[in-house]
Amino acid sequence: MASKAQNKFQQDEQRRNADHVSFLKHRNWRWLKVAAILTVILSLGYALIDQEPRPNGGSWYGYTLGTIGLLLIVWLSLLGIRKRRPTPGSWSLKNWTSAHVWLGLSLTVIGTLHTGFQIGWNVHTLAYVLMLLVIVTGIYGIWAYATLPAGLSSNRKEMTRSDMIEALTAIDRQLESAAQPLDRQQSDLVIAALGQNVFYGGALGRLTGSYPGCATNRALKNMPMGRSGEEAEDRVTNLLTRRADQLGQIRRHLRIRALLEVWLFIHIPATIALLAALLAHVISVFYYW
Amino acid sequence: MAFLIRTVDHTSSGKEIVRDRTIPKTDVSIGRAAENDIHLPDLAVEQHHITVHSASDSSLSIEAVGTLGFSLDGKTETSAQIAPGAGGELEVGSSRLTIERAEDGVTLITITQVETESDRDILRGFALESALPSKRAMSWIFAGIVLVALLAIPVATHLFRTPVENDPKGETPGQVVFDSTWSTGELSMAHHSLEENCEACHATPFVSVQDTTCLTCHEEIDDHAEMPRQAKGMAPFSTGDAIQWSIAQTLGKEGPLGCVSCHTEHEGPVKLEAASEKFCADCHDALDTRLTDVDFTNASDFGEKHPQFRPAFYTAYGNDNPDRVSLANNPVEMSGLKFPHDIHMDEQGGAARMAISLGKYGAPLECSDCHEETDDRIGFKPVEMEASCESCHSLVSGRSGAGFTNLRHGDIDDLREDLMRLDRGPRRSIVNGRTRPGQFAQGGRYYSNFGRPVASYLSLTNALRPDGLCGECHLPTTTNGRADVMPVNLPDRFLHQGYFDHAAHEDESCTDCHAADTSKEAMDLLLPDVESCRDCHLGETAVKTEKIVPSGCAMCHGYHTPTMPWRPEDHQNESPANLIATLERIKR
C-alpha cells in the first residue's frame, strides 16, 4: 500500500517537474539523442558505403536517405495538425514538438547527404532549399521564443494590450478637446495624429521599429518646443508627447511580437510549398526515370 | 475651489441628456453609496471608492479609499496626482470621469458611460497576422505555383505531345514544357544538344531510359561480350545494390548491363571518361570463379595481375589460321620465310655495305626501311618484296631496250611464265653481221633455236631449291606434285584483344622492345612480353615517376571494341556520324 502511494507521489512529482521542463530537454533530451544517433549513423553510412560512380540521390543509399527524409518531413509537418487536436498521453504535444525540432534539425544532414552535394536550378534543389528555409526559420523561431518574451513582458509595465489601446484613446480624447483653441495648421497636425491608425506602418515598420511617416512625431516636431506661453499649445504638446510615449510602448510591443511571429509566416508557407515541391520531385524523378 | 459635475446620459434613441451641478467643496467622494458626492450605481464600484482632493495650488490628488484602484489615463492606479491646469480621464467601473479645468479654479468632471467597445477587434491588430498576407493563402499560392509549373505542365505536355522519331543530330527541340526544371544536372558534352529535349531519352512516363532508345543513334556499338555471359561474369552485388536492382528491374528498368548503368547522365558537362581499372577489375579480378570456361586468366592491375600476352600467329607452315600462344611458352613463328634480322641490321655487315652503296638507302638499313607505319601510327603495313627487298635481292632477268626485265614475284605461275619467256628470247648470235637466209632467219617460219638447253630452261627447279633464287628467302615445297614455295603467313596484327600505340612510344628505339638486332631466325617472335612493358607501365594505382607510367586497363583495351582502347580524341565531338567513322576505321 505504502509503496503504491509512494509510486503515485513519485509519478505526480515527475509529472509536475516535467511540466516545467523545456520541450527541448523533454525526457532527458530523448529526441536530441535520437536525432544525433540517426545523423551519425547515416553520415557514417554515406562516408563508408561506396556508391558507384559517385554518391547520388539515385543510388540505393540515396533512395534510403531520400525515403527517410521524406517520411520525416511529412511526419514533422503534421505537427500543425497534431497541435490542433489536444490528446494527452505519451505522445504529448511536448513530445511531438521535441521530436519536431530535433528531427527537423537532423534533416539538414539527411537532406544534404541525399543530394550527394549535387545542386542545380531544378525542382529537386528547390525542394532542398525550401527544406533548409523551413529549418532555418524554425531555428530562428526557437531562438525567438526563448529570448523575446522577456522583452515583451518588461515592455508591458503591467499593462495589458487593451490597457495600452485604452491609454492611447484616453490621451486622444483629451488631445481632441485640448486642441480646440489651436489654429488651422496646428489643428491639422493634431487631426492627422489622431486619424492615423495605431497599427500604421505595416509589417516592415513593425519588424524594424521604424515609422518615418508617423503623424504624431510629425505633429510634435512642428509644435513649438518648450513653453511657448500659449497655454493651449503647451497642453497639446504635452499630450502629444504622452501620445508619442504611449505609441512607443505599443510599437515596442508590436516589434517584439512581430519578431516573435514573423518566422511562422515563412515556416508555414515554405513547409506547404516544400510538400508540393517534394511531390513534384518524387514524381518527376520517376516520370523521367 | 469647486467642482462642476456634468452628467451625460443617453436616451434609448441615443440623444444626450446633460445635467450640471456644482459641489462647492475641496474634496469630492466617488462611490456606489448614495451619500457620495458623485454616486455611481455600478456594482463594479466600491461603496466609497475614490476621494478627489483639490489642493490650494489647484492640483488634484486622487486616492482610492479601499483596495480597489481606478484607471487614470488608461493606467491602473490607487493614488495619483493631476498637475494644476492638466486634465485626465478617470475610469471607475463602467463610468468615465473626464477631469477638465474650467475657469475660476473650477474643476469640471464630466461623467459618461464607457461604451463597451469590442476590445477583441482592436486587439487583433497586435498580431503580425494583421499586417501580412495570411499564412494559409501564401501556402496555397506557393504550393499551387510549384504543382502547376513544375509538375502539371511538364506532365501534361509530355502526355499530349506527338511523339517524333529520334533525331541523331539532336537538333529537334523538345516538345515538353518546363521539363528542364526536372533535369538533375547538365548532360555530358556529347549529349549537350539534347539538353532541351528530355523526351528524346525519357520517352515513356515512369519507364526508365531503355537501351533500344540509346541504340537508335548508337547503332554501331558492340556488346562487350554476349549478354548472358556478361551477366554470369559480373561480380556479385552488395546487398543494397542487389535490392535496388531487383526492385528496379521488376519495375522495368534495364539491368546492370544496360547502357545507363555505366553511362550515367546528368553529371554535368563532362567528357566521356575512360573506365577505371577498378571498373574492369570488378569482374575480371576473379572472373574464372564465375566463368570457368574462359581461355584468359584474371586481371586486375597491369603491374601485378595481368596475363602474359598471347599474340595470334602461325605456329606451323602453311596453317590456314593463326593460333594464340602465350609468350611464356617460347613460341616459334612459322611464317614460311627465311629472314635473319641480325644480318640485315648489322651496321658492319654485308647488308649494310650493300645498302650504303645503293642510292635508295645510302646508309646501313634501318627498321623503317622495311617496316612502314600505318597512317594511324598504330601498326605497320605489310612488308612488300618489291619495295623492301628487291633492291638487293634482285630478280633482274635480262636487258630490255634501255632497262632490265624482272622476274615477277608473288606467284609461281608468273615466275614459270617469265622463265619460259626468258628461254624463248633470242640467242646471242655467235658472229656479228651474219644471219641465216630467208625463212630460216630469226622471225622466219623455219627459225629454230638450235643451241644447247640453257641453264635457265631448268632454272625453275633450280630457283626453287634451297640454294636457288627463291630459296634465298622461301622454303621449297611441292603443291599438287609441282614445285612450289611455302605460303608466307605473316599476320597484319599480332595482339587482337588489346592495342599498342607505336606513336606514343616514338622516343624509344625499336630494339628496346623488339630484339631484332640479335635475331638469327625468322622463327623468332620478336614481340616484347608483359614483363618488359612493366619496366615502365604499372597499374593505375602506381605512383607516377619519371619512368613509371600508371596505366589503367583503358590504355590498351576498349570496352565495346576490345581491340580499340578508349581515346579521348575519339570523343571530342561525339556526333553519331563521327562515331560511325571511328568504328569503321577500327573495322579496317
Image: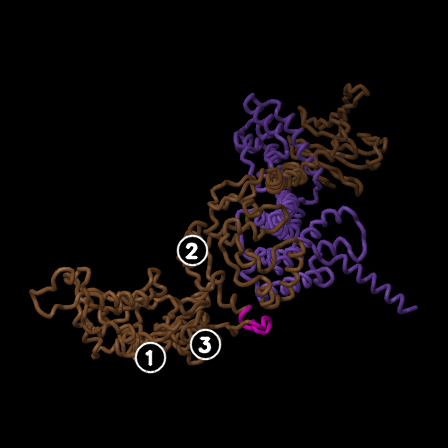
Q: Which residue is mark 1?
A: B521
Amino acid type, callout 1: Glu
Disc 1 from disc 2: Cα separation:
36 Å
Percent coordinates x, y for residue B259 in the rendering: 55, 56
Q: Choose the circle earlier in sequence order: 1 or 3.
A: 3
Instruction: Point out the residue furthest to the right here.
Output: A1
Local SS, label 3: loop
- The image quadrant of residue B316 is bottom left
In the image, which lettered chain appears brown? B
Q: Is residue B444 visible?
A: yes
Amino acid type, callout 3: Ser
Q: Which residues, given as a range, are shown in magenta?
A: B283-293
In the image, which lettered chain appears purple? A
Circle 1: is it few (<14), some (14-19), or many (20+) Cα within 10 Å?
Answer: some
Q: Is residue B162 above or below residue B569?
A: above
Disc 1 from disc 3: Cα separation:
19 Å
Q: Which residue is mark 2?
A: B584
Q: Which residue is mark 3?
A: B326
